[in-house]
Image: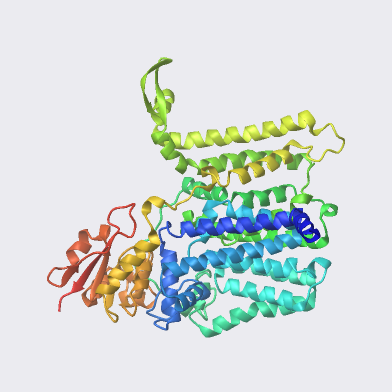
Amino acid sequence: MTFLKTFIRRAASTAWLAEILAGLGVLLYVLQSAIYIHQIIPTLDEGGYLYKGYLFVTGVYRPYQEYGPLTNKMPLSFLIPGWVQAVFGPGLRSGRYFAILLGVLMLAGLWLTARRLSGRWWAAGVVWAVAIDPILVKMYAQALSEGLVAAMLPWVFFLLLAAPDALKGGSKLWRTSLGAIVLGIVVVTRQNMIVMAPFALAYIFWQHGKRAGWWGLAGFALPLVFFHALYWPNILQVWLAWAPRGLLPFIDRLRPTLSGTAVWNPNTNLEGKLFAFWMAVRHHFIALVGALCTWLLWPKKSAWKSPVHFKAAVLLSASLLVLTVAHAAAAFGADYCQACFTLYLSFFSETGLLLTAVAFSAWEKRPGVVRQVAALIATLGVAVGAAYAGMSDLDPILMNLPAPRLRSAQVLPGATELWRLLSNKFNVTYDHLLVILPLAAGLLAGLLIVAAATAALAVGGRKRKGAHWAAPGSLALLMLFLCGVALSPTLVLGGGDADPACGDILAAYEAAGAHLASLIPPGSLVFWNGGLAPAPLLYLPGVRIFPPQLNDGYSHRIGGDGPQLFKYGYWNDDLAQEWLHQADFVLVEGWRYKGEMHQEISPAEFNELPATQPLVTCKDGAQIRIFRREP
């Protein structure tokens, strides 16, 4: 009986509750992921990482080889999913199951780091901040390099910031060295993460001393030297993409010489960039706004728990800032893929969660006038921006929500759509309503938060001398952050792309793959035009391909020198014509079988076989049509 009472008493303690809560957060994350992996349509990147990785690991091609698949990322982004498939079998299912495992590994690293730095309850809170955000769960449920990096990064921070001896002002040499090695592995997974490396290495010198710093530098260099030596010299093409031509003349010869005009040439404008930016803030709200709160309410030196916590906050802040700026420059400055900014942030947005956990208890609750004004402006600006990004989810509401019919303040029989009522009332178009209403709603929400903060202080906040949240700016910012936490699981902030109406994606791809494998024997030369994502090729063992086609239109050029383009993983129309006449089988996505493609597949040369079932049920022409060359 005494044992039972002791067990119950311990189970009821706050420590146990926090650990149980964290475990439930992980369980919620896994359950959501297990649903989403059946609903998310594969993208070009996901299919590319899986299929190219499998080709590399099985020795069909080598990363960065000439006339092979375009390898514009660091090798581990392909090799890791390739190794997983080599062990568990090629296919979308094994890749996405591995993605769930990576998500759990990410949560474990976040939990351990936050627990060491901020306690059990904050550790549980960080886990739940990810688990309640459906868009984050959807992004990490895909076999993408973002998930690989996001799974490793918290362990870098744990080893550098949160090891038990580190919190006492020291650290064992092996911990910091291992943390630096993991950071090096992060960089040879995605080269874009190198921009945070100088800050992390400088932190080792700053916090742990010169000896640890030099060992850390050596540990960081180890994976970079190994993989660069393994794939020398063509791996340098990845870095040359960042360097202006002529800056490194002794290796400029390795730079791809691309003639012709790129087909992928997105038409970007300021409105689109603003929308993409605020969409990213909306989908990473807790991490980014938590970090913004920390910077605007940066604690006094005496308020930090310890110098270790202050230095940790500096590293986390520097990492988050430089990575955000670098990826914003890539998304918006280079005009390559502004809509990708949300996905880019998923590499590292967890850094903002750790920063918030480390600094929250020390936030400056009574800042000066300048910071109060900045906090009020930030509160209104973020509310308006996040609402503006929600206009895409407003469309079905305006289209379908019924409203009464009015004329001259009289209610008429029947009903109309809400957008017609508002359009007639205010003489604005539907497209304008999609912008005006979110902006107005966001401004109203921001003003209500400011008013609530001011009222709270007027009613009770100033009754006690030295009351904590005695400034309207800081309190409004805190309330904005808490509103974001509450709204992250909802459509307001957590809207996403996975659509259950598209059917069971895994089952559809596996059925289509089995059908393709039953008709196309190993060794066949396959012309691929079967969709944006080359994932169906995973189910065709031993077939030969034309590698540049794996990147679809993103590696397509108009005109140019065909052999030279082929050498670097690109293609043009002349190459496509040549490959079409060489192929044993031609695979064409249903909706693409029109125009020139329809004319080029001659019935005299090819016999059409039964098509696959549709890969998705939510759009027409999603089946793969199969054409076999006649003897």
Q: Nearer the viewer, residue 3 or 121?
A: 3
Which quadrant would the N terminus be assigned to in this image? bottom right
Q: Residue at point 32% right, 65% down?
A: 511
Q: Tally the marks.
A: 0
Question: In the image, 362: left or right of 608?
Answer: right
Task: Name the quadrant containing residue 467.
Answer: top right
Query: In the figure, 81 relative to 336: above or below?
Result: below
Relative vertical location of residue 310 with respect to residue 399 in this rendering, above or below? below
The image position of residue 357, as x and y in percent, is: 71, 55
**Which residue is depicted at the point 52% across and 75% down?**
76
Residue 78 locus on image (x, y percent): 48, 73
Q: Which image quarter: residue 609?
A: bottom left
Residue 420, image quadrant: top left
**Residue at (70% x, 53% y) in the render:** 356
Residue that appears at 54% across and 33% down: 440
The image position of residue 101, as x and y in percent, is 55, 67
**Furthest-left residue in this view:** 604
Q: Answer yes or no: is residue 230 visible.
A: yes
Image-based side of 565 in relation to 281, left or right: left
Q: Nearer the viewer, residue 446 or 616?
A: 616
Q: Is residue 574 depicted above or below 387 in this figure? A: below
Q: How is the image coloured?
A: rainbow
Q: Residue furthest right?
A: 465
Q: Position of residue 132 (x, y in %)?
A: 58, 51
